[in-house]
Image: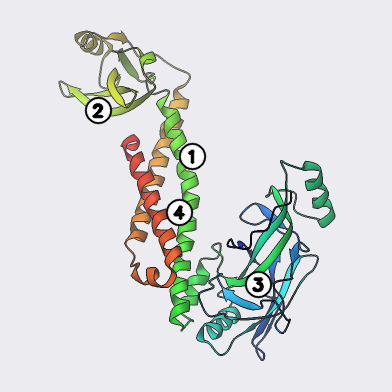
Amino acid sequence: MADEIKTDESPQRRDTFTGYDEINEGEKSCVSYVSTKEPDTYEEVILPDSMDFSRYGGRGQEGVNSTVNYGHQYGMFPIGTCGWIKPDSKGIIAKTFFSQKTQAGIDAFNLVTEAALRGWSIGFWPKETVRLNDDHERFDALIKQYKLAKDGYDAIVTKGLLAEYSLCNLQSNPGAVLHARDIVKSPEFLARLEVEELAVQVKFLHNMMLMLKTSQETIESLSDIQQRPFPNEHSCRLEDPGKFDKFARKTCEQKHEGKCIDIVYGIKEGKSKIQALRYKTKIWTAGDAKAHCKSREGSFEPAKESKSENEFTELKQKVTEATHEIRTLHAEILTLKQQPSKKLEVSVGKDGEYVRKFLERLDGDIRRLYGRLD
């Protein structure tokens, strides 16, 4: 599917992690793949021969850009220049010369030789992308033609305009950032690495949010059965469960003569009402529970043996685990929010703002869940 290239918009970015085929200490250069045909984190594949190099190329090539940046940060001094760039059967390979005139360039080469940073990322404007759902036959044909992976992606970029490539820290390699901070001397580079360090943690939290969603769904699914009595308890129905949209259960919400009573609340249109009472058989005899239920003008049902006891036990265990995971995640978020951010605001504005907003959103999402977990 062909798309109009909008070069007034920011280029898209795709990362790769391949290490280096060659490092030359004498000329301060390295040869490496800046893109490969492996599936990326966007669940896309970029074909090796997909890029148009009319705007980007080797240094000395007239009319094209040849600067190499760190992390696509165009406001920073370039860390070097591209000697040459070309596609092969594996991906797009390039030779990078690191500047020895700026501290950022010196730091970048030192990080490369120390293997503290081993990632590359291309910036490009996509022109044509073949998607699995839109053109299954062509998608399969490209897999065979280019010998691509059989799964892990649903789109193949077949045409694009290359804008640049950058050295970067990949979020899959968090230890690299910690090591890099011991090497660099450029304040500008160090400020960027601080954001990279936060980005590593934000990526981790983003993955945790996927887990959070699953946990939330588990909690929601439990709501549908909370109005049913567990096998080890007597039940007293006060309201028809059909009157409500969902339910919430509170353990030992009330007591009678020192004995706990679990309360099931029915919820509809944001308002709650007691729908049923639950009496644990370890605490309540059937006779005592029935008498109390009668005093509340409810409909009593004694505890029954049930084959679904394991189902309830498993669901309760899942919610317990989800609660622990969510609270652990929240503690991580609060720690990140307390980190000094003034330097980040000055150095990397938009990235720092993104990190803060993301953390605020996570914090809010988890706090909204607390009512269901307690």
The disc labelled 4 sits on which kind of residue?
Leu
CB under 8 Å between discs 4 and 2 = no
Q: Residues within 10 Å of mark 1 (few under 14, many from 20)?
A: few
Is 12 or 249 nearer to us in this picture? 12
Q: Give the distance between the C-alpha atoms of the residues marked 3 and 1, in whole angstroms.
A: 35 Å
Kindly state the secondary structure of the residue where label 1 is placed.
Answer: helix
The disc labelled 1 sits on which kind of residue?
Thr
Please give the label number shown on residue 214. 1
Frontmost of labels 4 and 2 is 4
Which x, y percent locates residue 277?
28, 18
Image height of 108 relative to 352, above or below:
below
Q: Is residue 277 visible?
A: no
Q: Give the distance between the C-alpha atoms of the residues marked 2 and 1, in whole angstroms.
A: 27 Å
Dot 4 or dot 2, earlier in sequence = 4
CB under 8 Å between discs 2 and 1 = no
Of the 4 image quadrants, the one containing the C terminus is: top left
The disc labelled 2 sits on which kind of residue?
Cys
- 10 vs 46, left or right, is left
Is 260 or 109 nearer to us in this picture? 109
Image height of 301 relative to 135, above or below:
above
Please give the label number shown on residue 252. 2
Q: Give the distance between the C-alpha atoms of the residues marked 4 and 2, in whole angstroms.
A: 34 Å
Q: Residue at x 75, y 66 (%)?
A: 52
Dot 3 or dot 1, earlier in sequence = 3
Residue 264 location, quadrant = top left
The disc labelled 3 sits on which kind of residue?
Gly
Dot 4 or dot 3, earlier in sequence = 3
CB under 8 Å between discs 4 and 3 = no
Q: Disc 4 marks which residue? A: 205
Q: Disc 3 marks which residue? A: 19
